[in-house]
Amino acid sequence: MPQKNAQDRLWKILTPVLLVLAVLAMAKTLFVGLEIDEEYAFSLGFRLVKGDRLFYTMWEPHQLSALPAALVLALYTAIAGTTTGALLFVRAVVLVCKAAMSAVFYRDFKQTLGRHGALLSAVVLFVYTPKWFLGPDYISQQFHFTVAAFLCFYHYYTHGFRRPWLVVLGAVCACFSFLAFPQSALAAAVIFIGMVLLGRRGKEPTICKIPRGAVLFVLGCMACAAAFLAYVLPGMGLTVFLQRVSLILNDPQYDFTTSQRLALLASQALNTAKFLAKPLAASVVLCLLWWAKTRQKRDWIGLALNLWAILAALLCVVRAVADSSSDERYFMPALVLAAAWAFRKGRGTAREPLFWLGFLPGMAAYAFILRSTLLGFSATFMYLTWPALCGCFAMLACRQENPEQEKLPQGQCVLAALLVFLLVCRFWCVLVTGWKPANVATANLKQITAGPAAGTWADEKAADMQMALYEALEPFAGKQVLQAIGEQHGLGFMMAGGTLTIGQASVISGTDSDPRFIQYYEELPEKRPDVILYDEAEVRDMAAFHAWIEENFTITARYPVTHGTAHLQVLVVD
């Protein structure tokens, strides 16, 4: 009892501290930093707002993630009548949604995980975003809609199968997650199997002898698929739709076989293994010394795995500070292994729905994402975050079930190490164009005063580019724009108060010399641009595409626009 009272007093102090740190960290993210991947997410949504159509005029590899961003941008432009300041608004909306999701998580899990464990978990969920920024890019959507779907399913299966509408709502959230990253749709099969097993074991009401939740999940997904096709197909037809899908799937960037991808991953895995070997060795040594001293009978394997994850996370904190890089996620495989161990002997416990509805679908999704993404091996670890967190929740639930057997708060310690990593990266690192290392002490931050990013602060290069784009495009209100630039500036399309339209096949960086761009103008001559932008400091080989532009478009005027470190060339097309 005295120990419990001491813990309660400690948490009375820690709770406001954690909440204040989390709010301050996310407030910094709200106002500071800008990266082209976040801009890309905005430009996808903006295309829909301006009347572009999925698959028909949008030849984007990630266009299925455009719907949520389009809804929020449409709301903002309807209220404000402009896109100026839209970046802050959308970030704020995402932040409010994250806060609401964390609050729901705490409410539903405070009994299962304990108040302190649920609070720590909710704070981690609030502070975490896959790519650190708040913009609704496809990876962030895949994570957050997955969590939202899980919360719906979990409540239904742990509260006596009441409120079946939650399963339908969860199916809608899951479909948005699958749209954001279609390869993750394999998780649907795992979720269905889990629902059938959980339903039968819990004697859930059935429909046609199948547990009701599983049936509602399938019907919800089918309804979403039908609604999506009803939205996409009119005016295009199934034949054109399939042609467009084939065209987009044949993106040269993704032209690699499974064996080539596996060979690349294997070559990169060695560096991760070398990094993880050090904290693993330290964990094993510490556990052996502990065992030699106490000779206690306990779960030494689980303790070693958890200690490994903690030490690896703290080592990543040191690297993040030293390298000014937020891309230090090497601890995640250790955390996933610790998570997998936490689910052993979980049948019939609170861990069972965590396993079937959270951990296993997350691992299935990761397996297929790993095959299809362009990211390097260590960068894919962000997709392991959700199953890893489910394992941490399982550790907390196990201790809550057996407080006498699990006296050490291992789950809380693992989550605390993860939270330290997240907070240090949030406060210390600054997102800059190209994911280059930068921190608050060395980054030359400048305020952006015009355009959709108005009111935010970014590194000098990004801030100057936003101002140059504003100055270059302000005279062309209502015109159609092509950025013939390797590193696309998605917010540039939203200049001139949101009156511009986009005159190019895709707004993703790096594909502008793709021969499909020429095909785009042949099939859709109405998308030929009125104004074209070049970047004088081009970092990619755009010579072929620029030569085609000069030959096929009648350029009536060209002039430079310079703002600080940014140097653009404006071409006016007849």
Image (tube, helix red, strand yellow):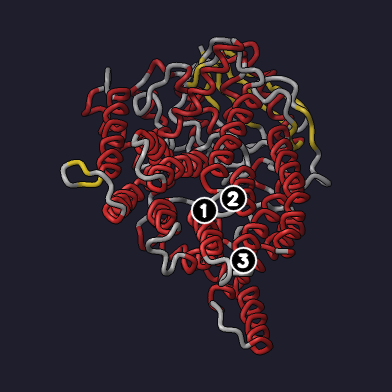
Residue lying at 35% horizontally and 43% vertically, measured from the top left: 161
Residue marked by disc 2: 118
Label 3 neighbour load within 10 Å: few <14, some 14-19, many 20+: some
Residue lying at 44% horizontally and 28% vertically, measured from the top left: 67
Label 1 neighbour load within 10 Å: few <14, some 14-19, many 20+: many
Could you tell me the amino acid type at mark 1?
A: Thr
Residue lying at 22% horizontally and 28% vertically, measured from the top left: 238
Mark 2–mark 3 Cα distance, whole angstroms, equals 14 Å
List x then y, in percent, for residue 526.
39, 15
Mark 1–mark 3 Cα distance, whole angstroms, equals 16 Å
Q: Which structural element holds mark 3?
A: helix
Between 75 and 264, the residue placed more toward the observer is: 75
Residue marked by disc 3: 410
Quadrant in which the N terminus is drawn: bottom right
List x then y, in percent, for residue 308.
61, 71
Residue 261's image quarter? Answer: bottom left
List x then y, in percent, for residue 272.
57, 67
In the picture, the disc for residue 112 is 1
Q: Between tags 1 and 3, which lies in front? A: 1
